Structure formats: C-alpha cells, structure tokens
Amino acid sequence: MAATACTATAVLGGVRLSPVFSVSRSPSPSFVALRRPIAFSGVNLSDAGRFSSLKIRASSDESSSSIQGDELLGDLKQKWDSLENKSAVFIYGGGAIVAIWLSSIVVGAINSVPLLPKIMELVGLGYTGWFVYRYLLFKSSRKELADDIEDLKKKIAGTGE
C-alpha cells in the first residue's frame, strides 16, 4: 500500500479552506482510507464582514417557546382524548407508511430504467412552466389560485358548503 499526501482547497462563502490529509490506497482503486482526520488550515476570516446579514440573534425569552410547546402538547393530548376510534388512527398511519414505502419502490424502479428519469424531469419542467403561466404570471390568475386554495382549505377543515 502506498501512502500519498494530498492537499485540496475549497472555497466556502469567500472563506478559503485548505484540508490536509493523508490517504492510503488499497489494491482496488475504489477504496480510499483516511489515515488521520481532516485538518483545516489557512482559514481567511477577513471577509467576515460580508456575512453580516447572516447573523442570527438568539431570543432571550426562552419561556415563550416552552409555553408554546406545552400548549401544543396539551392540544394534542386533548384531541387524542376526544377521539372515539383510536385504532383508525393507527390503521391510517400504517397505511400511510406502507404507501410511502411502495411509492419509494416505484420511484426506484422508474429511476433504474435508462432514459425514463430524464423524460420524467422534462415532464416535470413542462408542467412547472404551464403552472407558472396558468396561475402565477398574471394577477387575475393568482387571485383565482388563492380562491381555489381557500376553497380547498374550507373543504378539508369541514367549514365549507
């Protein structure tokens, strides 16, 4: 086995990172083993002023988030206690998990067929273009889409006609 020292340079948001590591190659060319952890050197932090818009301010009021969490748990417990047929929740949940699993298998099968994934991407791009033209490009069509979404929300919530 031959050990080789490699250096690579990556630029992440204007900050230059230079990882230095040694690798050893086995007889098969697809296997590379790291001999020691990657160490970053040469980090240039002088450009940190450019990222001032990315600063995150922490909230000093931690009690409000815990109150919201307690309210959420209380609401969930109240809804769970008000359910009459709790077994149906488990049946629907199990059915949803099986449906996701089956759709994953179908997508994997479609993805393994040559050329079919690219055709599906083109279909998706075409539908996206049509949707933008039909519902998002003009003000009247945006209003129509918003009205359709509100009608659907009312049907789902049971407050509609």
Image (tube, rainbow, N blue to C red):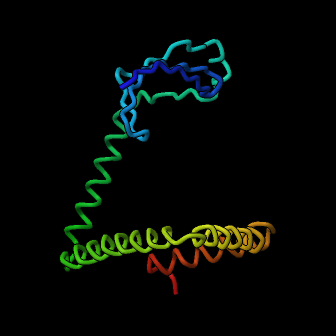
Left-right relation of 136 to 154: right
Q: Position of residue 64 (x, y in %)?
A: 37, 39
In the depicted view, which residue is nearer to us: 141 or 90? 90
Identify the residue at the far bottom of this view: 161
Instruction: Classify the position of the N terminus by image quarter.
Output: top left
User: For the point 75% across and 74% down, which residue is it?
Assistant: 134
Left-right relation of 56 to 1: right
User: For the point 33% across and 73% down, which residue is it?
Assistant: 96
Left-right relation of 107 to 87: right
User: For the point 60% across and 70% down, which residue is it?
Assistant: 115
In the depicted view, which residue is nearer to us: 118 or 137? 118
Q: Position of residue 150 (x, y in %)?
A: 58, 73
Q: Position of residue 15 (x, y in %)?
A: 61, 21
In the depicted view, which residue is nearer to us: 53 or 17? 17
In the depicted view, which residue is nearer to us: 36 or 41? 36
Total marks shown come to 0
**With respect to residue 28, does 45 lie above or below?**
above
Q: Position of residue 12 (x, y in %)?
A: 59, 28
Q: Does the rendering let one see residue 60? A: yes
Left-right relation of 118 to 97: right
Q: Does the rendering let one see residue 142? A: no
Identify the residue at the far right of this view: 138
Q: Place residue 21 in its image quadrant.
A: top left
Q: Place residue 129 in its image quadrant.
A: bottom right
